[in-house]
Structures are given as C-alpha cells and as structure tokens.
Amino acid sequence: MASIFTKIINREVPGYIIDENEDFIAFLDVFPLAKGHTLVVPKKEVDYIFDLDEQTYIGLQKFAKKVALKVEKAIVCERIGVAVIGLEVPHTHIHLVPINNVSDIDFSRPKLKFTEVEFKVIQEKIIGA
C-alpha cells in the first residue's frame, strides 16, 4: 500500500508543496512543530533512509539543503533544525524545522494547528524566498 507521502507525490491527496524535481519533493508538515516545518522526501518509496542507494541518499541531502535555505530565508528563526526519525510514515523523510532553541525540535511537544489559509500563506512565502 502506498504511503501518504506517495499519495501526495502522485497528487492523490493534497499537499502544500514547496519544491520538487524529478526525484524529490518538499512539502509542509501538516502536524508541524513550528511555522515552516517542512518534509523532504524522495519520490522513490523506501522506508529507511539508510536503505537508500548512495546516489538517492546524496541527492536527498542536497535537495534538503536547497529547501532549508529557502525556509530559513522565509521564516524568522535562529537556524533550521534537521531530524530523521523514520517511525511515523514508512517512507524516508527529513524534517526541516525552523528553531530558535533545542526544545523547538522536541517531537513530544504538541503540534501546531494552522488553517488551510495559514498553510497556503506559509507555502507561498517559502516558495517566494
């Protein structure tokens, strides 16, 4: 069964897409820790990041850096925190989280809630960065 991320990639379910190329996609996390919390995902559905082939792994990191720089430009923060947890969705993904201190990337914290309009404003701000 396809992961929720594959469904976003295939446009079967909506996503607030920030950037995309033929191999990778980045979209806003709909259960964010911070405004601008973005997920970076390979289009190839592989559960565990260290099971990716070398070329895809390196490409994912390069794409994540490009996206992180856009998020950092668009969202006021000290820096972009990076996390790979890999337990929530069985599809490799990197969390890019705007942070001002280490507790901002604590995944046990309650998630923020944004309206569709708020998500679209954040999406457009990052795309425009």
Image (cartoon, rainbow, N blue to C red):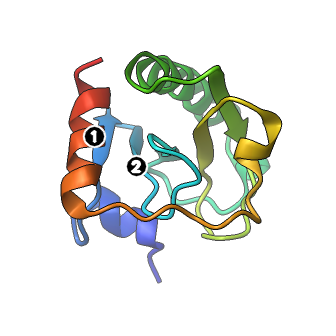
How far apart marks 2 and 1 lie (CA) works out to 7 Å
**Camera sees residue 58:** no
Q: Residues within 10 Å of mark 2 (few under 14, many from 20)?
A: many
Residue type beneath disc 2: Leu
- Disc 1 designates what residue? 123
First in sequence, mark 2 or 1: give its number: 2
Looking at the rendering, which quadrant does residue 24 occupy?
Answer: top left
Q: Amino acid at mark 1?
A: Gln
Corner quadrant of residue 65: top right
Residue drawn at (27%, 63%), measured in percent from left and top?
A: 115
- For the residue pair 24 and 13, the one nearer the viewer reads as 13
Packing grade of label 1 (10 A; few <14, some 14-19, many >=20) is many
Q: Is residue 11 left or right of residue 97?
A: left
Residue extending furthest bottom?
Answer: 1
Residue 104 percent location from the top left of the image? 71, 43
Counting from the top left corner in percent of width and height, residue 42 is at 50, 45
State left or right for residue 6 relative to residue 115.
right
Q: Is residue 112 above or below residue 55?
A: below
Work out whether 64 lies above or below 14. above
Q: For the residue labelled by badge 2, is the local secondary structure a helix, a strand or a loop?
A: strand
| Residue at the image position 73 percent from the left and 68 percent from the top | 87
Quarter of the figure with residue 83: top right
**x and y, in percent, of residue 121 in the image:** 22, 42
Task: Give SS at disc 1.
Answer: helix
Read off the residue under disc 2: 28
Q: Which mark is residue 50?
A: none
Near-viewer residue (30 or 4) = 30
Contact between labelled residues 1 and 2, with CB atoms less than 8 Å apart: yes
Residue sitting at x 58%, y 62%: 91
Residue drawn at (40%, 49%), measured in percent from left and top? 28
81 is higher (above) or lower (below) than 8: above
- Quarter of the image containing the C terminus? top left
